[in-house]
Each structure stands twice: as structure tokens, then as C-alpha cells.
Amino acid sequence: MNELLEATGIAKAYGAVVALRNANLSVRAGEIHALVGANGAGKSTLVKILTGAVRPDRGVIRIRGEVLGTHSPAEARRIGIASVYQEPALIPDLDVQSNLQLTATPSGPFRRWLSELGLEDLDLRTVARDLPLPVLRVLDLARALALDASLLVLDEMTAALPADLTERVMDVVGRQRSDTRAVVFISHRLTEISALCDRATVLRDGETVGVVDVGEGSEEAMVGLMLGGTVAEAAREGAATPTTAARAGGTPRVAVRRLRAGTKLHDVSFELHAGEVLGVVALEGQGQDELFRVLAGAQRPAGGEIRVDGTVVRFGHPSDAIRAGLVYVPADRMEALLVQRSVRENVALPFVNTPLRWGAINMRREARLVDAAITRLRIDTRAGSEVRRLSGGNQQKVTIARWIAAGVRTLLCFDPTRGIDIGTKREIYALLRELAAAGAAVLLYTSELEEIQLACDRAVVIFGGQVVAQLPAAEADEPTLLRAAYGLLANGSAAAGSASAQATAGGQP
Amino acid sequence: MSATKPAPSPSATMVRCAQDWRRRAREQTIISLLILLVALVALLDVIRPGMVSLNWISSTLLYAAPLGILAAGQTLVMLTGGIDLSVAAVATAAGYVMASQATAQGDARAVFFGLGIAAAVGLVNGIGVGVLRVQPLIMTLGMSLVVAGFLTVYQVLAVASAAAVPGFVTAVGSGTSLGFIPNSLVLWVPIAALVIWGLRRSGYGRLLYAVGDNPTAARLAGVRVWEVLVVDYVLSGLLAGIAGIDLAGLTSTATIDLGNSFLLPSIAAVVIGGTSIFGGRGGYGGSIVGALILTVLVSLLTIIDAPEPFRQVLYGAIILGVAAAYTRVVNE
């Protein structure tokens, strides 16, 4: 076979935490090869080893049969490996142009790829910090493509992308197939893998447990390998089935009326009741970020009204929202975590958030509450003395556990399942359902449309800063939601809104 | 240490292994600092046999106390990712104002004045950093100049009343009890106990780490970060004031450059002790050992009878060496 890349017996440990035990990856020229596995299976570590950012403890990497000697990003680039990491790689304080110069990216090809990816209008003098996450991801991709490498490694490339951009990216990546090239594609979205990839290597607990030819029934096979025999069944059954929430009229927990904020949120009204999970669906940049930040007290609204249990509230600081029972899990874990501190300190942070609680900590009570939350969310605390050593999924659980331990009434979750594996996702859906069943109200923004029917009772769709549709979960299948999210769903009052929204939505097709 | 229970799936031995390893690494830094301290003391004894005695230990502790107390405030500030460059000026101001007011106002009120000024400067620093969001480095550097300037003016105006350090301050700062126990431990030990306990077991201590690690996360968890910072700089000011008064007691005189040479050692003690200058990691235990190491180092350099520039080079090189070694241990 025509092997472009062959990595065998790769192992890597960080202290006592073993990231990779025995990983093998063999990629043929001309294929798009998926790398899948649960969180903490070692995908990201393997990618960093391939791209020279991390030195393996053991193992051999061959490129076209030749053993790769030194490990450095420069060496990897020289022999033709280009990569897009999970986190944006541009330097935030430089503009795009300077970032390109810094990495010696050829600007002609970069521009060409950028327009292929639908961002031809981007001003390269924009400072990276001011660009939204999905744009940064696409820039990273264009940069990697411009290097004209023979092996392209894409780590969770599509995780933060809205549906329209995902489509373009998949299209461009799909066209990378040629006799001399290959792509390693990492994603948690199995549908993407089925649509795009030729073969898939499955990692579990730092080991390669199988290579699957993508085709009929391969999704089941991958999930089975990823979770390991017995767990697979449980996870499949564990998929939450929305219960019809006890919505016996009454005062809504949170009522939002004609809310405006920033430049993107124009006029949003909805009600969130105790006992329900309400999904929010929107393409990138339709005002959903502002909506959540306003409800969390992190940003001041420009107009409109928020009522909590019937009383009008004004939040000047997140502590005001927390006092009113509204707690927020932000999209970016790094916004919520103390990465150098322990799981325990992270979870217990809200316990000490007012000067009244600055005194002695009741360590036993704290340990009890924290342990209960850790057990409930099944957080793996092996590397718990510093949160930065946890896997992404476990970090995400810590951000939620904080509010579970503090006792949650209204939970605002912004894309909590971004870039985490199927098993953990299902645990999170189940947890949200449980919280709602116990009387909490949950507002869930998700970039993965299938989650609406898996976890929610109802969905509101926002387009151009306005609500364009409200649907019960039963009607909220992916095609309907997608049409609504593009502002294409003609439904009464929403029609007028979407017409004006079209103008404000900017670059959206 | 995290008292979290392991998840049911991974084997218990793995968990214990990982926790053991982390704990050992953390203990090792303080143990290796202690080894360095003992080595320096041993070296001293080799160069000048018979020098290390109970008396020597006692006087070393007396000399280390002001630095150790200054380093306490500096630790509290550096844990939040800040820095307090005004500690030396504040210590000087507190010691000098106390001494110059003692005759006119009485001893107790004079001490109170000194501490009051220290706390006031800390409050201004805290408001600047916490509320007006001035860079800590600039804010405290500016305040240190302001304080030094005021002190010069004050010296000219108050020249009539001679600076006299009250007797009990001298007794605390330079006296010993039972022959060798330094009296200044009366100040230093409770302060150390309170700071170490507070950082581990109080809500405020947790917040210092939280703010230093990630202010955005602290804010989203409902913490008003400015409150934490204002109190932090007031504490640093107060501790600098206490150190200044202790220092006046140690030297029995108060001049307007009383504490000036302590600024960089107060930072060095904290950094050697393993507190990250970026905040979020460290503690006071290390700073104490750092202060002791620096004090022993000075007396070592004094007795080896080398020219001053050479001593300075050695002093700087040793601090750099310790800091570099520490970084290695922490980053595996």
C-alpha cells in the first residue's frame, strides 16, 4: 500500500497521566482519514506529536517510509505536514496580515483559499482578537492549506463552526484528495466523518483499537470501538428522551421581552419555565452570545426587559444574576476555569463569592458538596490537582459541576457539548433533563441541531437578532431548524422580522 | 490538596499514584529550598568555624523578620498577578512617622499613625488597581515616588521633633527573650500563621488565587474582583507598615531611607519561594524560606570579604539560579 504516514507504537505520558499508550496511525496517500475517540483518548496528543509540537516517549513515525528523526514544528513543516489545532493559533494582538508574515504563509494562495472558504471580504488588517471564533478557525484552515502540504491535520476543525461554514469547509477539505496528499480529520460528528472520510482510526484510552472502512454501518462500529463493548449499549440507551415538561401555566422563571444588546441582538422575547429545557438555535453571530451574556449579567442590555419570577431585574454584574438564580456556563471553557487550581477549588468557587463568605471555609461541608457534584457528573479527577491537566470533556463537566454544587435554579448553557465526545455529550443531555425534572429551568444554546430533539422541550430560533420561530421539540427536526436558522421559515410574525434581519446578517448567504 | 473522590472507572492505584506525584513535586520545591538554606548555613560554618550558634540564629531571625513580613504582603499581591513596588517606601514612611511622632503623641498613638499611613497608601493602590484598573506596576511605582516625596517634605517640616524610636518598639525589633528567642517572632509568627491559614482555608484566600488565575472566571462566578484587590493592597500596605516599624525597632533609628534597600529582596523572596509572578500559584511558606535564604546569603557575602561589586554579582547570580531551578521543577 502507498503509505504516506505511518506512526507505530506511539506513547506519551505527562507525569503520571498517560495520554498515549500505544497509538498506531497509518494514512495512505489520496485518502481522508478520520481519527476518532472519546475525550481523553489521546487524539490531540497524537496530533501534537505528528506536528512536532510534542516529543513522544516511544514510537516511530515514518513519512513515505522515511523515519522522522527530530521532532520540531519546523521539521514537520519542512517535510510537508500542516495542521490546524483545536484552539485558534493566530496571535490575538496582531492583525491577520502580520500573523501571516510571522508564519511565512504565502499570501496569494492564502487569499485564494480564503475566498474558496467564503471569506473573500475579510479585511486582513483586522486584529485577530476582534474576529469571532469560527472566522479564526477558518483562517487557520486557509493558512494550513496555503502551505500546500502533503499531509493536512485538522483537529476538531468543524467543532465551533455554524452549519453553513461547516459545509464549505467539508467541501474544500473533500477536494484535497489527490494521489500525493492526505488529510487526517478529527471530529466528534460522525455524520461528517461518514460524509467525508475514507477510513477511520479509533483511539480508546491512548491505544488504537481499530481501523474502520467508512461506509454502511460504520458509525455504529466506530461508536462501539470508541466506547468499548459494554459501555456502548448503555450510552445508546442513555440518550435522553424529552419528557413533556410540567408547564402548568404560572409565572415563567425567566421572561425576556424585546431585549436589545450590542450591535447584534435587536428584539428578542421568549419565556423560560421551571421544569423545561429550552433550546436556542442560531447561525453564528445572530445575537445569541449577547443574549446569554446579558442574562448572565456579564453585559448590559441596550433595551427591553427581563423578569425573573415575575419581577423586573437589572443585572449590573454577574453576581446580581447569580443572586436571582441565573447561572452561566460560557462557550469557552477558559472563560470559566481556574486552570492552575484543583477541581475542588474550581467547583467551590461560587461558595466564596461574596465578602460575607470571605472567612473560614467549612471544609467538610465543601468536600461533601463538591464530591457529590463530582460523582453526579462522573468527573475523572485523576489529574484533578490542576484543571489544565484534565481532558476537554472533563473540564467542561467542571464548569457545570460548579453550579450543580451551588444548587441551580436557572442554568444558562452556551454550547456545552462543543468538541466533546459522544459519551460525555449524552451524559450532559441526561443531566440537563434531570435538572429540569427536578424543577430547574435550562436555557441551552447549541450549534449541533440534533441536540434540540435529544435534550430540549422547545426551541427558539434566532436570526438577525430576532426570534424567527418557536417550536416544540417534536417539530424541531434538523431540516426545519436549519431553514428557520437561515430565516427561511415563513411563520406569521417572524416573516417581517426576517426580512429586515436579512440586511443585518451581513456575510451570510 | 484535592480531597476529591476518584471517578468509579479508573483504578484507585492510578489515582493515588497521580496525587502522590503531584504532592511530592510540590513538597520537593520547599524541601529543596530548605536544603539550600541548610547548605548556605553549613558553608558559613565552614568559612568561619564556630560562627553558627544559637546567638547567630537568633540575630539572623531578627534580621529576617522585616523582610519576611514585607514578603507576606508581596506574596498576597503577587498571587493575584500584581506587584507592590511601594512596600519599601511604605515601610520607611511608617517607621519614620512613628519615630518622629513618638515624643509628641505617645508611643501607642505614634505606632497607630504609622500603620494608618501604611493602610492609606495601600487603599490608594487598591483603588487604583482594582477600581481604576491601572497596571499594578505603574500604580505602586507611582505611589512609592509620591510617598517618598511626601516623606522628604515631612522631614523638613517636622525637623523640630527629633526621631526617637519608642522603647517597646526597639525591644520587639531587636531584643531577645530567654537569652536567644528573638522578640520579633511575636509579630512574625502570628502573621505567618494567619497568612498561611488564610490562603488555604479562608474564602478570601481562595479568591486571591482565583483572581490571579483567571479574573474573568472569578467575575462570571459572581466575584466582584475590585473588592478582592482593594483589600489585598490594603493588607500589603499594612504588612509593609508593620515591617517598617519592626525595622525601626531593629536599627533603633528611623531615617527617610530606612527600608529602601528592601524592595527588591521582598520580591526576590517571594519568587524564590515559588509564587508565580503571573498569579494563581504559590504560597507564603516558600516566601518565608526565601526571606531566610536571602538573609543568610547577605551575611555569607559579608564575611567572605570580597569586593562589593563581586558580592553583588554573586547575590544576583544565586537568585537567578534558584529561580531557574524552581521553574524546572514545577514544569516537570
Image (tube, coloured by chain):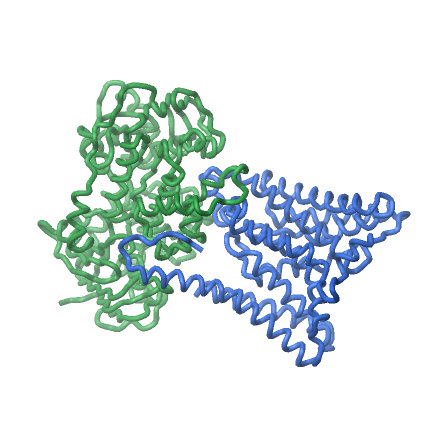
Residue located at (45% from left, 65% from top):
B24
Count of numbered circles in the view: 0
The residue furthest left is: A216
Percent across and percent down for residue A298 are 45, 34
Percent across and percent down for residue A431 are 28, 39
Percent across and percent down for residue A195 are 16, 47
Residue located at (79% from left, 57% from top):
B170
Tell me the shade of chain B: blue
The residue furthest right is: B160
B328 or B112, which lies in front?
B112
In screen coordinates, is B330 left or right of A171? right
Relative to residue A157, is residue B53 depicted above or below? below
Q: Quadrant of the C terminus of chain B?
A: bottom left
In screen coordinates, is A357 left or right of A469? right
Relative to residue A274, is residue A205 depicted above or below? below
Percent across and percent down for residue B152 are 81, 49
Q: Quadrant of the N terminus of chain B?
A: bottom left
A424 or B199, which lies in front?
B199
Q: Answer yes or no: is residue B309 visible.
A: yes
A316 or B110, which lies in front?
B110
Residue located at (18% from left, 33% from top):
A477
In screen coordinates, is B274 left or right of A264? right
Tell me the shade of chain A: green
In which image quadrant can residue A5 be found?
bottom left
In screen coordinates, is A284 left or right of B93? left
A217 or B110, which lies in front?
B110
Q: Answer yes or no: is residue A77 visible.
A: no
The residue furthest front is: B178
Relative to residue A32, is residue B54 depicted above or below? below
